[in-house]
Amino acid sequence: MGNKHLLALFVMLIILISACASENVVTLDDRKQETAKPAEQESAPQKTTAKQSIPIEIKELLEKSKTRVADVYYKYRGPETWANFHEFYIKGNKIKYKPYLEIKTLDQKDSYDSIFIDTSSKTAASYCEAAYCTYKGKKQDLDYDKVYIPTVFDWIDVSQATKIGEEVIESRSTWKIETDKGTIWVDTFYGVPLKAEANGKTYRFEQLAPNGVQDSDVTPIS
């Protein structure tokens, strides 16, 4: 074999070795990128779409309203009543409240002393049913949205709740709970609020008397 052939063979061998070596070369930049990827994945925040849940102890408290309160009577004081009270009777989807009347006489044809509400049909009407009504019976149909006042059950229909304290109201133990509707003070036995605050306004539910409302209390006279 001549020198020329040996030289050519040597050159081809060098080229072959160089090609194989280049395939296995990892640059410094490549190593940096490989080590950076796991770090980026670890630092990325976890996305969550889960809704904030109500703590189990608050759920259990509010559930008492379903097992211990079949119906309820209370005196309501709020922005609509000023320093006075409306008397509420609630049983099922029927509500009657007797608004505070500045004029006590009920001797006019349009005089009324009670408002009856049906939450299932979204209807409301005024009636005069007191013994001293000169003209008894139905007076007129009313705008449901205008005369409806949130009840103790509406205030506990919440999606977020956090216990922030405990207080005694009218000799009853309550939990003070911050909710998406405002702050409520919930009776620890019955699971309904005795007080609520929202948007700088205060709502009181006094002389609470569960399980004494009769069908006749929430059914208008014919």
Image (tube, helix red, strand yellow):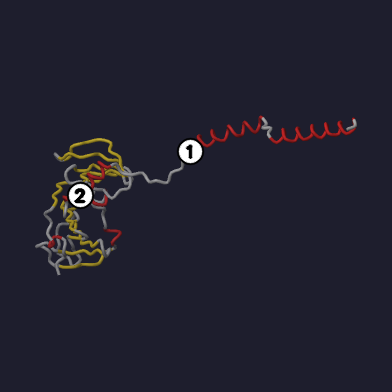
Q: What percent of the width, then of the height, locates residue 146?
A: 29, 59
Q: Amino acid at mark 2?
A: Ser
Mark 1 or mark 2, whichever is nearer to me: 1
Which of the 4 image quadrants contains residue 196? top left
Secondary structure under the numbered disc 1 in the rendered image: loop
Disc 2 target residue? 65
Q: Nearer the viewer, residue 34 or 51?
A: 34
Secondary structure under the numbered disc 2 in the rendered image: helix
Q: Amino acid at mark 1?
A: Pro
Disc 1 target residue? 45
Which of the 4 image quadrants contains residue 56? top left
Which of the 4 image quadrants contains residue 25? top right
Which of marks 2 and 1 precedes in the sequence? Answer: 1
Q: Nearer the viewer, residue 37 or 57?
A: 37
Q: What percent of the width, then of the height, locates residue 52?
A: 36, 44
How packed mark 2 is, by other alpha carbons closer than 10 Å (few <14, some 14-19, many 20 or more), is many
Q: Residue lying furthest bottom in this view?
A: 222
| Residue shown at 30% from the left, 48% from the top | 158
Q: Nearer the viewer, residue 90 or 24?
A: 24
Image marks 1 and 2: residues in contact by CB distance under 8 Å: no
What distance separates the C-alpha of mark 1 from that of mark 2?
40 Å
